[in-house]
Image (tube, rainbow, N blue to C red):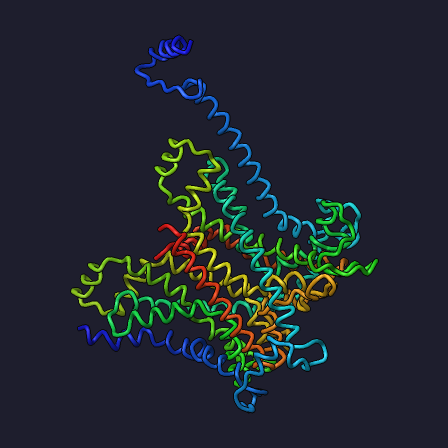
Amino acid sequence: MEAKQKIETLEEQSYQGLVLVLKDDRHNAKQKARASKISHGVWLFFTYLFLTAAAIIMVFPFYWMLTTSLKSGAEIKRMIPTFWPEVFRWDNYSSAVSRLNFGVLIRNTLVVGVFSTIGTLLTTIFAAFAFARLEFKGKNFIFSLLLATMMIPGEMMVISNYISVSLLGMTGGKNLIGAYLAMILPFMISVFYIYLLRQNFKQIPNELYLAAKVDGKSDWQFLWKVMVPLAMPTLTTILILKLMGSWNAYVWPQLIATGNRDFYLITVGLRDTFNTAGNIDDYGAQMAATVIVTVPLLLVFIFCRKYIMRGVSRAGIKG
Amino acid sequence: MESKNNWKAWLYLAPVLILMSVFTFYPILNTFVISFLKDYNYINGASKGFTFDNYIQILTPAMNKYGNSGTMFEAVTLIGLPNTMLLTFVTVPLSIIFALAIAIGLNSIKVFKKAFQTFFFMPYVTNAIAIGMVFAVIFDTQYGIFNFIFGTQGHPWIYPNPQTNQPVNYWSAFFAICFYIIWHSLPYKILIFLGGLQNIDAQYYDAAKIDGAGRLKTSLRVTVPLLSPQILYIMITSFIGAFKEYNSVIGLFGSTGGQFDQTTGPRSMKTIVFFIYEQIAANKVQYASAAAVVLFIIILIFTGIQFQVSKKRVYY
């Protein structure tokens, strides 16, 4: 019986060329292939089902934020929630903008964001160049010392830094320039970005450096004419992530600006303006404000996705 | 030439070293010192000498006399530490498991892969405070969409029910914040895992197939071990991050940190870091420092344990 089947299969497939027939659990190769195709299909179906469910949960808060931001208080209070605003209440946005004191928040956030980003880029370029290209005593020790600080919770530094800046009269909402300095100076360094850029600089071949030396270029010229242009993608990543960091900063700016609303950064302003618990009539304006804070980030994500992903995933690579 | 380079290198490093000395190295040492100062007043620098009082006050009920609204011991040991630990040990493992499942799923499909990737990465680029406020609306007691979908109208998650005055059960609030933290922490983990998965050589899967391993078995016995360097990295960074949970509490519960039924658990969702910032704002920096040192030691211990375990279980 079994032998007959075997011959049949051989005959069936012989015209397709020489075929090795493996028999397993009384199924021939064709049946086996069909079974695996079906199981693959079933598996794929459940994979898509799972991913779709997960994606809906991930995206839903954004959708709910948008629809709620356009609803009236009465519509939000319906017993059966509406999934699309019946009347678009754009005035939620104008009320959010005026209550947030939006112009001041944007001005402060831009000043702090731009200066701390420029500062970070400069210190990072210099330090990464020294670590990647120059030789000096204690190089490895200092580099490991910097990396070690990444393990220490930032709260350890925040306490003393707060004491320092308040002794210098930068807190309490009296001195705008002082508050700016207090929000910028401690954030002009990032060990992680130094590490990232150093890795990038190290990939630039030594021959380029030697060639530049032969041409009589100084280290300084080599850094700005060769290394910085070659490392532009990494520098762009740092620029974007750093600006996003300033936009999202809450803890430190909140400590510094307490006492004067005119010194708030955008996230501090958002939380402070809408801090009343469970005020339903206010939800429309509140969600409009969160949309205003979230949309610029999503736009940056859409247009600079490549750079953001690169910087983030780089962190996971061992090295 | 080498010696000429020497001083130049220090010049390039100078900005970083100066700024870090002022804002990183000195503060770390100073915080240690302050945590041992008795009745420290930072405005005039006066203190009554060295003491263990700050640690004793936050960690033992021995000196239970501070303040009107609860003691330091209560704030740190009965509220801050349990909240921090519970949040860490629930959200980190769950988010790693979800992220792994999603990453493995994403890695096995071709159609719509890019679109899915975009959806899953969206929460990463959002503001923790803003989205926390959105979750507070979703979990609203009377009109929240969460209560509507699950038919639990009137159940308080974040704020007490304004009609019945039913207080918030601690575990309801805990569920809401865990949901939010996991949602917010998934994208980064998915991205790292996906990067690791794409680097796994196809021959391992072929070998598993020849050996007759099913899909689930292949995932557990081949994929996860080969992904162990990424899992270790994610474990360490997420544990450190979770021990410092703060923005999510502020985003969801506002700057009060929530107000829950005391018979069901801690009466707020304040974490250790929440306590630290509260004390800084109240000019009680010595307690903030002691709590920060405690947090630092906890993080050090857990990171050490994970490195020890990883020696046996991580395959490079």
**Residue A103 in view here:** no
- From the viewer's perspective, is A191 left or right of A68? left
The relative height of residue B316 versus residue A125 in the rendered view (above or below) is above
In terms of image quadrants, where is residue B19?
bottom left
Q: Position of residue A201 (x, y in %)?
A: 30, 61
Q: Position of residue B125 (x, y in %)?
A: 53, 55
In this view of the protein, which residue sits in the foreground, A216 or B169?
Answer: B169
Residue found 50% across the figure and 78% down from its top? A161
In terms of image quadrants, where is residue A198?
bottom left
Q: Position of residue A3 (x, y in %)?
A: 38, 10
**Residue A91 in view here:** yes
- From the viewer's perspective, is B269 left or right of A227? right
Which quarter shows the N terminus of chain A?
top left
The relative height of residue A100 versus residue A83 in the rendered view (above or below) is below
Count the numbered circles shown.
Answer: 0
- From the viewer's perspective, is B70 left or right of A1? right
Give the farthest residue toward the left: A214
Q: Position of residue A184 (x, y in %)?
A: 49, 73
Give the farthest residue toward the right: B164
The relative height of residue B57 versus residue A194 in the rendered view (above or below) is below
In this view of the protein, which residue sits in the foreground, B25 or A176?
Answer: B25
Which quarter shows the C terminus of chain A?
bottom left
- From the viewer's perspective, is B68 left or right of A311? right
Residue found 28% across the figure and 63% down from its top? A225
